[in-house]
Image: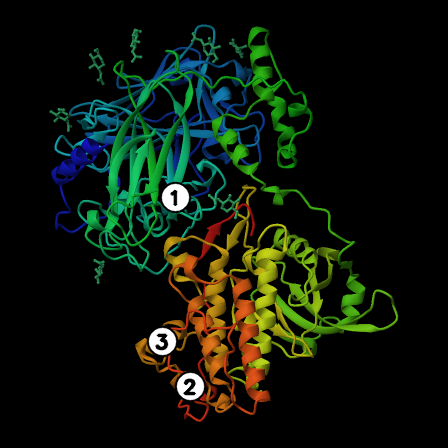
Amino acid sequence: MLSYALYLLILLHIFPTAAAATPEAYTATDFILLNCGASSNLNDPSGRSWDTDERSRYAPSNAATISIPSKATNQHHSVSQIPYETARVFTSPFTYTFPVLTGPKFLRLYFYPNIYSNFTTTLSFFSVTANNFTLLSNFSAFLNSPSSSNPSFMKEFIIYVLDNQMLYLTFTPNTNSFAFINGIEIVSIPDKLYFRGNDVRIKLVDKMLRLSYLKNDTALENLYRLNVGGSNVEIQDDSGQIRGMFRAWYQDDVYINGPDVSYMPHAEDVHINYTAQTPPYSAPEIVYKTSRGMGNESGLDWRFPVDSGFYYLLRLHFCEVLLEITEPNQRVFTIYINDLPAEIQADVIAWTGGPEIPICKDYIAYVPPNDGRRGKKDLRLSLFPNLQGLPMYTNAMLNGLEIFKLSDSNRSLAAMNPEPVITSSPTAVAAPSPEKTKSKKSSVIYVVIGSVTAALAAVAAVSFLIFRQRVKDSVSSYSRTSGSRVPLPSDLCRHLLLEEIKSATDNFDDNFVIGKGGFGNVYKGFVPDASGSGSTTVAIKRLNPSSNQGAREFLTEIEMLSKLRHLHLVSLIGYCDENGEMILVYDYMAHGTLCDHLYNSENLPLPWKQRLGICIGAAKGLHYLHSGTKCAIIHRDVKSTNILLDEKWVAKVSDFGLSKAGPTGGDHTHVTTLVKGSFGYVDPEYYMRQQLTDKSDVYSFGVVLFEVLCARPAIIHSLPREQVNLAEWAKTCYGKGTIEQIIDSNLEGQIAPESLSKFVETAIRCLRDKGIERPTMTNIVWSLEFAMQLQEAYENRGGHVEADGGISFVGVGTSFPLLDSGSKSSGLSTSSSDQKVMSEDVFSELMNPLGR
Ligand SMILES: *[C@@H]1O[C@H](CO)[C@@H](O)[C@H](O)[C@H]1NC(C)=O
Ligand SMILES: *[C@@H]1O[C@H](CO)[C@@H](O)[C@H](O)[C@H]1NC(C)=O
Ligand SMILES: *[C@@H]1O[C@H](CO)[C@@H](O)[C@H](O)[C@H]1NC(C)=O
Ligand SMILES: *[C@@H]1O[C@H](CO)[C@@H](O)[C@H](O)[C@H]1NC(C)=O
Ligand SMILES: *[C@@H]1O[C@H](CO)[C@@H](O)[C@H](O)[C@H]1NC(C)=O
Ligand SMILES: *[C@@H]1O[C@H](CO)[C@@H](O)[C@H](O)[C@H]1NC(C)=O
Ligand SMILES: *[C@@H]1O[C@H](CO)[C@@H](O)[C@H](O)[C@H]1NC(C)=O
């Protein structure tokens, strides 16, 4: 292992660093779109114009006599008409000739298994070659189709067209079979984008750790192109140019091995500084702005099904956009490919020289066949933190990934057709998943014609899910049950009629509105008791159906809240899901939020003992969430506006569940959870190391304790820099022994010095940098109750209290000066400040299939 490290260390110095030339955008010099079998030129959904191949200069002059243009018999609704609606069918070898410039080209082949005239593509097996490279051999588009509900697909190759060459593309049907193609796309690639020349060596990740380079006599097939930690990127957004390379980038989450609990920061407002080494066409900005870091897992691990017996080029895209990380040795990790180290000390800042500068790293790895048989096998990429050099954070990251298969020594990229998966369970056929029933009609095309192939096709049609789908499914089995409708727990909370809600709010009259949010309005209303004997005042949250919080989140909130019953948690009384409405009905909290009683309001300042009582109540609510339920629940958005007060000033923690759930994208079955950590409250450890624990809530609660003591918001932007963040400022003052200067002046003379000491010490411990050093909610409840006892003892003894023998000031630093009750408080006059609480999404999307 040591010799590896040394070797890699030496290698690092061979690698060229960024040159200073200005990066340029790229416009493709060759750009050909052929809509095979079509009778006229047509535009696809992205607006690109496809030419018919019939009379084009690329097809042989006798094309009409040696091939058959045809229209798909069954056009599936999910399949784009251009270029998939028509195909050219070949019963003998057929060659297209493209006079293109020298250099690398994307060659994209579009296939739609279907019935073309009397040609059923279940029976089609053929080869495709391009400039003496075998791209496909004994290929069945039918068997390679991603799924029966999404049968069309594209295969992308890269061919380097040498000097004075043309690009020849030949389709050769197997004996007694036929070939077909729906569309052909050719787009030129910048010369040094993938083929970086002989001087850029690429690490060959094997036990020998040799160096290699990509020669221009290698053909590539792209298998994966991923916007890691981000969303799908459409072809027209690839390079941001009028005519880029039209690469589509996909989400990576389905390839994550194990439950996906990663952390995905999304830096929308950063500027990506491309370099000559990593020019703008390397990958679009969005790929570099989004990334995946570790959540509570110990590393990041992806598995990609590939064809064994080939070498693969892996291009890893990196760009450090977390504002905390600006120096080398802050985030250092090791990259493994197939469990072999590819990079021992990956340190993006050390590579790039600074944040917001992208870089791609190439590696080549071989995937050996099993027992000499070429079949599907997983290519594994794993990243683990490397703590040897004591980096500041324990984490790893990745922004983007491309995986290419390299042509073998026979100049071939061809692999076997995916093996039909034989399932013994007949239910696999009998019970199609709901989203697949739509495609029933089109799967009629798979009805078998012929005899020998019939058996094969039947099996294949049954177990049609090839690797992509299989991976998706295996991931979705991780309790991503949100797709199926959970029975609503009517035994635990009431199902209210829309009529009842309407009469409670005078048909959602604006006069009843007591709050507004991105989710919709909150109304105050009265609903009859379940017993019918009286009525209850309630808060009615009417979700806007067009908001991001969809039906699934609505159900999550109901499920979650109806199971949680505690004096210090806001309780859900009922819900209404009639008529497409999504309405949640909660206990009405007469005194509103804790925040409203601290600053920026007309309310009278609360006395110290009442504040202490509220803090104890809220702490008990959080303690219940953390340890009183079967599985610990982390609130993730603890702040003074989420602590509500009922008519008896009992504190109730609110807003857990719904605000954490977010939109669901595309055809994925997972829930995308929006983590709304609010500015000023977010645990820096969670923020930087992405290790979410119940101690993150403890940190936020520490901020709340100081809000209560100082009566100021967690963030006030207008203050001098060191005072902006309450948590930081309080820690600074505590360290300097000047905490008394920031206490709410309204509390002057009220607080027993010992009570204050206990309270401040508790709050400071909550704000410790390391979660492990923070107290648990149990400790906090105990400490605050003790602070209350000290306060009461002080008041009972007429203003003087001594801690008796059994109780000591645990952890109070000697540096903390006990206040004498007469000391003058020159705290901030925050009530005059018109600063609003800044409540922003510090992180955005965090994929969290497990819910919260
Ligand atoms: C399809 O029909 C054409 C004539 O229309 C015939 O030449 C060809 O052999 C048929 N192909 C198959 C696969 O039956
Ligand atoms: C393909 O191979 C043949 C024979 O080896 C050679 O004559 C021809 O030039 C090659 N064509 C291309 C495009 O490389
Ligand atoms: C292809 O590579 C060979 C050597 O590997 C080199 O001589 C030749 O110039 C390259 N061709 C192009 C067009 O770059
Ligand atoms: C990125 O570029 C911008 C403008 O070109 C520059 O102001 C900024 O300092 C650069 N950032 C880094 C990290 O180099
Ligand atoms: C991460 O958290 C999820 C749920 O929050 C849990 O199921 C999983 O076991 C945790 N993983 C580790 C490595 O702690
Ligand atoms: C290349 O082709 C030969 C002859 O068909 C075969 O024996 C050999 O295994 C092939 N090589 C690879 C790497 O597939
Ligand atoms: C062609 O592929 C089919 C399906 O995978 C397979 O059954 C058949 O044996 C292959 N034929 C050849 C000649 O390799």
Q: Amino acid at mark 2?
A: Leu
Measure the C-alpha gap from mark 1 to mark 2. 53 Å
x, y percentage for residue 286? Answer: 36, 50
x, y percentage for residue 383? Answer: 34, 40
For the image, the number of numbered tags is: 3
Assign the N terminus to one quadrant of the image.
top left
Q: Amino acid at mark 3?
A: Thr
- Residue topped by disc 2: 819
The numbered disc on residue 604 is: none
N-terminal label among 1 and 2: 1
613 to 443, vertically: above or below? below
x 42%, y 86%: residue: 819
- Along the viewing direction, whichever of 690 and 96 lies nearer the viewer: 690
- Residue topped by disc 1: 228
Measure the C-alpha gap from mark 3 to mark 1. 49 Å
x, y percentage for residue 572? Answer: 70, 63
**Between marks 3 and 2 in the image, the one whose residue lies nearer the viewer:** 3
Q: Would residue 641 appear left or right of 126 to someone viewing this image? A: right
N-terminal label among 3 and 1: 1
The numbered disc on residue 814 is: 3
